[in-house]
Image: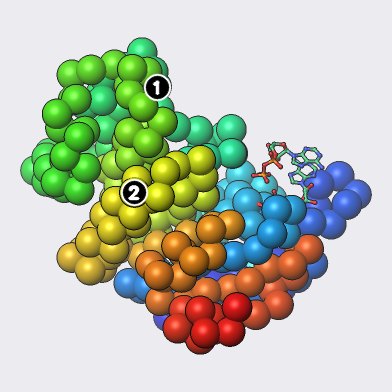
Amino acid sequence: TPILEIRDLHVKYGNVEALHGIGLTVNQGEIVTILGANGAGKSTTLRAISGLLKPSGGEIRFEGKPAHTVPAHERVKLGIAQSPEGRRVFGTLTVRENLMLGAFTRSDKAGIAESLAWAYRLFPVLEKRRDQLAGTLSGGEQQMLAIGRALMAKPRVLLLDEPSLGLAPLLVKAIFQAIREVNQTTGLTVLLVEQNARAALKLAHRGYVMEVGRMVLEDTAEALIADP
Ligand code: ADP
Ligand code: ADP
């Protein structure tokens, strides 16, 4: 069974349909990217998956179960850039406090400590700054903190909304490398929305391309790179 499966999904804003019946499958352990121009419907797709928007038709399934039967904290959304609802970090809390907030639905103390160690290993700068207020971090560091916090929840699918937005290429590389490392080491499943197709296809195993509310292409990352 795929960990995430979308069938014929329709979403409307008011009377205007933004998704016209899209399909998408993500298997356990995969990194899948959704590419497409601004306005294509990528964020809308993530919002529907994370339960922030109610579909007007079609199905979203997690591990075969209808999404609305899955608790919200297991549908963890990470809207790093652009989407105000998933936004970033709490500036008046420390880095460590921000990370621990990500684990608020968990009670497995040892597991939480392990996740914290993971976050610090992936992003050493976060450990260095763990007692600093998050508001004093640079944009790139806040981005790392947002990803670290999402990982603290131990999501079954990590949803990333344009993690590269506005960041210097070196930082994008560091962040994507960290995502690959968690994927390879823990089998974390990742659904990544990106406008930066080149960076996303280097990281992803498979990709979808959206155009104005429709999926127009689905293939392996290698094939999509070869045929831009
Ligand atoms: P992308 O993430 O690919 O840039 P979006 O999912 O944000 O695309 O947008 C898809 C379409 O839905 C666009 O036409 C956009 O203007 C519209 N849209 C997005 N959010 C809203 C909203 N809150 N209300 C009305 N229309 C919206
Ligand atoms: P994104 O492409 O990620 O949706 P935008 O900058 O287009 O980012 O949108 C920022 C905010 O405005 C989002 O909350 C989005 O839902 C909302 N929005 C986007 N398009 C529209 C629209 N056509 N009508 C109303 N709200 C919109």
Which residue shows up at 45% across the image and 42% down it? 167
10 Å neighbourhood of mark 2: few (<14), some, or many (≥20)? few
**Which residue occupies the foreground of this view, 127 or 59?**
127
Q: Name the outermost residue toward the left.
A: 110
Q: Position of 219 compared to 54: left or right?
A: left
Q: Earlier in the sequence, mark 2 or mark 1?
A: 1
**Whole-percent x, y for residue 105 in the image:** 32, 38
Q: Which amino acid, mark 1?
A: Phe
Ligand 2's quadrant is top right
Q: Is residue 46 above or below residue 129?
A: below
Q: Residue at x 84, y 57 (%)?
A: 17
Q: Which residue is mark 1?
A: 90
Say which mark, if any, is on residue 151.
none
SS for dot 2: helix
State which quarter of the image contains the C terminus: bottom right
Q: Is residue 75 above or below residue 198?
A: above
User: Is the residue indicated by label 1 positioned so its CB lies within 8 Å of ligand 2?
Assistant: no
Of the pair 64 and 150, the residue shown nearer to us: 150
Q: Does the numbered disc 2 mark a residue whose Cβ is under 8 Å from ligand 2?
A: no
**Residue 58 appears in the rendering:** no
Assign the N terminus to one quadrant of the image: bottom left
Image spot of residue 146 (x, y percent): 37, 37
- Residue 35 x %, y %: 59, 65
For residue 63, what is the image quadrant?
Answer: bottom left
Marks 2/1: CA distance? 25 Å
**Residue that mark 2 sits on:** 170
Q: Residue at x 33, y 17 (%)?
A: 136
